[in-house]
Amino acid sequence: MIVISSTVPNIEAILIKAFQKYAPSDHFCLIDSPEAEQATTAASWFPDLEKLNQLPKLSLIHSIAAGVEHLNLNEIRPDQAVCRVLDPHHQKGMFDYLLWGVLYFQRYFDRMLQQQKQQLWKQYRQSYSHHIQIGIMGLGHMGGYVAECFTAMGYQVSGWSNSPKNIPQVKSYVGSEQLSEFLAHSQILINLLPLTKDNTGILSAELFQQLPDQAALIQVGRGQHLIEKDLLNALDSGHLRGAIIDVFEQEPLPAEHPYWQHEKIVVTPHVASHAPMSVVVEQILENDRRLKQGLDLCHQVDVNKGY
Ligand SMILES: NC(=O)c1ccc[n+]([C@@H]2O[C@H](COP(=O)([O-])OP(=O)(O)OC[C@H]3O[C@@H](n4cnc5c(N)ncnc54)[C@H](OP(=O)(O)O)[C@@H]3O)[C@@H](O)[C@H]2O)c1
């Protein structure tokens, strides 16, 4: 039995609808229903952990997304496993979004959109993929895939992770000792790190200073990776050229937030990529089945590492 748990009302409604559509009706329930006592798995997005922890049979907390920071991992019981959803559609969706973002800077669309407002006719020399250095923070399920795709298109790609990676034609940088060197080679910096206590606030003034002059940022990790005022300073000083931001400390982004009107910032409403709901439900059902049969779970998270 799967219990649906989200403290975000519209997400809870989306989950209920998806389970009604894609799961047998006797396989899921709501947290306040009597059936929840029988639940073995929780389908979760910012779940109510206090309520979940009272369910006697609950052994698996399942994120409905790739990220797990919303689960508050240090409050999860040691006897409970944590899994996340991973899917090729998710990777492809992320690459499509990032390719658009890279082209936006590579082909000067950022400047031309501003020019149009001023009815200014100014041309730019075409720049090719092999001229562009892309730096990807995080070379996991998403970052590794995206690195391969950009490399296949001729971009110069480097990546930064906790452990060394062997992806053909992708220069691998590891740990805090190699971060500066990695940043110095990143004209377009893509953040695809998971949010952990080690990397909260990593997109800071100190990091931006180490990027080449006129570098751009594409931020698709999590809002808490970025110190917002540091980004605004780096853009306003002219050091950074622009930023595309998909994830925010507060979502939805508040109406009075300076990003909305900033001419060097593109705001998108956390849409870079999502797994289809049919896949989310299918993977949670499959892991619940595996749990009952004592099989290895798919896409299990290392709770100690936090991702
Ligand atoms: N905006 C969106 O729509 C959207 C959609 C999907 C995902 N995301 C974001 O993308 C994140 C990444 O997803 P994923 O599935 O690729 O995660 P993942 O498979 O867990 O990979 C994480 C990568 O980050 C590296 N890493 C973690 N902490 C690090 C640190 N402190 N220093 C250096 N490297 C570090 C890991 O290094 P090792 O490989 O060495 O362990 C790994 O390569 C998600 O957690 C989520 O925040 C956003």
Image: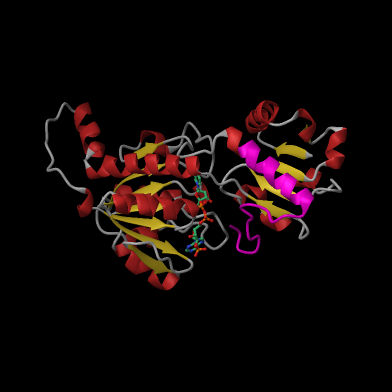
- Let me know if residue 287 is in the magenta part: yes
Indicate the position of residue 12 as horizontal and vertical percent values: 67, 32
Highlighted magenta segment, given as a residue range = 280-307
Relative to residue 154, is residue 7 drawn left or right? right
Indicate the position of residue 209 as horizontal and vertical percent values: 33, 61
Residue in the image at 40% along x and 34% along y: 260
Relative to residue 303, is residue 131 drawn left or right? left
61 in relation to 1, above or below = below
270 in relation to 56, above or below = above
Residue in the image at 70% along x and 40% along y: 285
The image quadrant that residue 42 belongs to is: top right
Relative to residue 225, is residue 236 drawn left or right? left
**Front residue (pair 208, 104):** 104
The image quadrant that residue 63 belongs to is: top right
- Let me know if residue 32 is in the magenta part: no
170 in relation to 270, above or below = below
Relative to residue 223, is residue 60 drawn left or right? right
Residue in the image at 66% along x and 60% along y: 303
Indicate the position of residue 147 as horizontal and vertical percent values: 37, 54
Indicate the position of residue 73 as horizontal and vertical percent values: 67, 55
**Front residue (pair 205, 11):** 11
72 in relation to 11, above or below = below
Quadrant location, the N terminus? top right
Residue in the image at 59% along x and 45% along y: 85
List the single residue furthest toward the bottom.
Answer: 177
Name the image colouring.
secondary structure
Quadrant location, the C terminus? bottom right
Q: Is residue 181 visible?
A: yes
